[in-house]
Amino acid sequence: MSLTNQVAFITGAAHGQGRATALALAKEGVHIAAFDVAKPLSYPGYELAKLSDLESLKQEVEKLGAKALIFQGDVRNNEEVRKAVEATITTFKRIDILFNNAGICAYGLAHELTEEAWDSMIDINLKGAWITARHIIPQMIAQKSGNIINNSSIAGLRGMNRLSHYATSKWGLVGLTKSWAIELAPHNIRVNSIHPTGVNTPMNDGLAALEGKTTEEIAVASAGNLLPVPWIETEDVAHAVLYLVSDKARFVTGSQFVIDAGLLTR
């Protein structure tokens, strides 16, 4: 895939889709800068990744023969992101891939959401992607190449019950994707979004616990895939990212890549 010795900056990298993508890229010879909050947050209230998850990711990446940097930080914090990006560029001299993956999800009727719930969802899922990209894009422009993948959702292409704040954040990523694709095409930078259905991650385990349901019940209620699978796996997301950042997708930009097990066909 011509990815050897490229450098990827991944947010929300410690577990779930971010971790799987980091490992899939490392197998292709990509060096990894992994950024994750790696601590509890007051909202959404379920357990997030831990610092030990970041540390074990570094070990796994290095076992695959790639180099790894890890950063504990919040995508809402401009200075924490800036310092991590600068450290990555100092070490590797470039950043070829940005995977804006950091995100949260929680249920709630629109008129019952607290301001903390609304602001946390928008600031982590949407503003965090913008904050991260604004520090990385100048480096990509300077090197005249790059790939940005924004991790949206099927909720970024349709409305979803009790997920108005989540859907709003994910629709916003589509706007960023299409606008950045236009702005950055002259610099040979491609920008795409991916749209998974429900993914088998610790986040969905946390959501199920908050709802007092099983993960299977959550899958059926929030997704209802056409193919007979309750969840897709994190590796399915990683494979989509691998394709989009490879030369096999060299003329793909501004697109919305759906990995939905047929859900949107319903």
Image (spheres, rainbow, N blue to C red):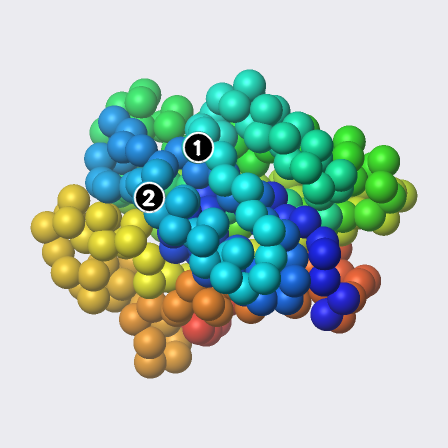
Q: What element carries label 1?
A: strand
Q: Residue at x 58, y 66 (%)?
A: 27
Quarter of the image for the N terminus: give it: bottom right
- Numbered tag placed on residue 172 in the rendering: none
What is the crowding at mark 2: few (fewer than 14 residues within 10 Å), some, or many (at least 20)? few
- Point out residue 49 in the picture as x, y percentages from the top left corner: 32, 43
Q: Distance between the residues labelled 1 and 2?
A: 11 Å
Nearer the observer, 182 or 13? 13
- Point out residue 4 in the picture as x, y percentages from the top left corner: 72, 62
Would residue 251 be visible to someone looking at this image?
yes
> Residues at badges 1 and 2 in contact (C-beta under 8 Å)?
no
Q: In this view, does 79 lie above or below 30?
A: above
User: For residue 26, what is the image quadrant?
Assistant: bottom right
The residue pinned by badge 1 equals: 72
Q: How many labels does the image show?
A: 2
Would residue 122 be visible to someone looking at this image?
no
Q: Which residue lies furthest to the right in this view?
A: 186
Q: Which residue is drawn at 13% across and 56% down?
A: 213
Q: Which residue is drawn at 10% across and 50% down?
A: 212
Nearer the observer, 238 or 226? 238
The residue pinned by badge 2 equals: 52
